[in-house]
Amino acid sequence: MPAVPPVASKTSPTFSPNDVTVLFVLGGPGAGKGTQCARLVEDFGFTHLSAGDLLRAEQTREGSEFGALIRDCIKDGSIVPMEVTVQLLENAMKDTIAAVRGGSGGAKARFLIDGFPRKMDQAFKFEEAVCPARLVLFFDCPEDEMERRLLERGKTSGRSDDNADSIRKRFRTFVETSMPVVDHYEKEGRVIKVDATPAPDAVYRDTQAKLTKVLGDNF
Ligand code: C5P
Ligand code: MG
């Protein structure tokens, strides 16, 4: 990726919502976004793109100019400059669509964009330069439950940010920087909110019911 990612200067979207359905998936760290996305992929044929996973891959990619920057932000629970993340997502969407066209083709592409947008500038840039989003799926979970899950995951995840110090910083970033994004979309009537406190099966039943109620078959 060039030092100034091309999306930085783009002012019209690469994809039309007529061809591509985008659902943003938000929720605090440990709310269960990835777990629920994996199930939605199986039942609805979404492609799951996790912004955090794409950043971690870019961090370790040989020759990346952004490796050190991404590493510092992740450890610190702060938000990576938006051009980097938006560009990684656009690249991944293009790759996915090219792969599908090379295969069976025809069907409308559907993406779950997980852990994104975490800051208002990411939201604006993505919708301006990549694709307008259809909805936000928001997994709502109390901090003490998220902390419990993250510390449990930290025993085996190998993630540099699944420790008590980073978790505290990530919660703070979520409240101060990411919740305003949820509030913004809520005001526009584009949020589906799901209580993510129960066990994964129950959360998924609720998610599925709410999603099909709002989207029907038309997405
Ligand atoms: O979603 P996940 O917990 O995997 O994200 C890990 C980290 O990646 C975040 O704490 C943040 O530092 C970075 N990130 C970001 N912008 C996003 C998603 C993740 O800066 N949209
Ligand atoms: Mg995740």
Image (tube, rainbow, N blue to C red):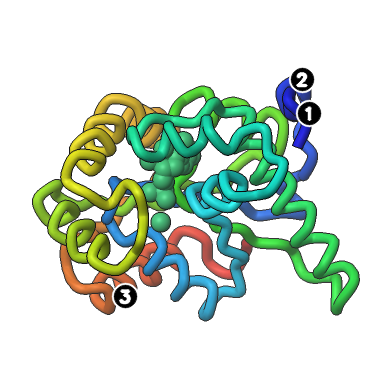
- Image: 202 above or below 131: below
Left or right: 194, with 141 as reference point: right
Query: Compared to 159, does 212 lie above or below?
Result: below
Mark 3 to mark 1 CA distance (whole Å) = 40 Å
> Of the residues under marks 3 and 1, which one precedes in the sequence?
1
Determine the secondary structure under disc 2: helix
Which residue is the extreme one toward the front?
62
Q: Residue 56 location, x and y as percent?
A: 52, 50
| Residue position marked by numbered label 3 in the rendering | 205
Residue shown at 56%/62% (left/top)?
A: 48
Q: Amino acid at mark 1?
A: Pro
Instruction: Residue 137: give x, y in percent of width and height.
Output: 41, 52
Mark 2 residue type: Ser
Residue beneath disc 2: 9
Name the element at disc 1: helix
Residue 190 visible somewhere in the drawing = no
Q: Quadrant of the N terminus?
A: top right
Residue type, label 3: Arg
Disc 3 vs disc 1: Cβ atoms closer than 8 Å? no
The quarter of the picture where residue 167 lies is top left
In the depicted structure, whether residue 154 falls above or below residue 105: above
SS at mark 3 in the image: helix
> How many numbered tags mark residues here?
3
| Label 1 lies in ligand 1 vicinity (Cβ under 8 Å) | no
Q: Quadrant of residue 39?
A: bottom left
**Residue at left offset 85%, top offset 72%:** 105
Disc 2 and disc 1 in contact, CB within 8 angstroms: yes
Q: Picture coordinates of residue 116 (x, y %)?
A: 48, 42
Where in the image, quadrant-wise, is ligand 1 located?
Answer: top left
The 10 Å Cα crowd at callout 2, few under 14, some 14 to 19, many 20 or more, is few
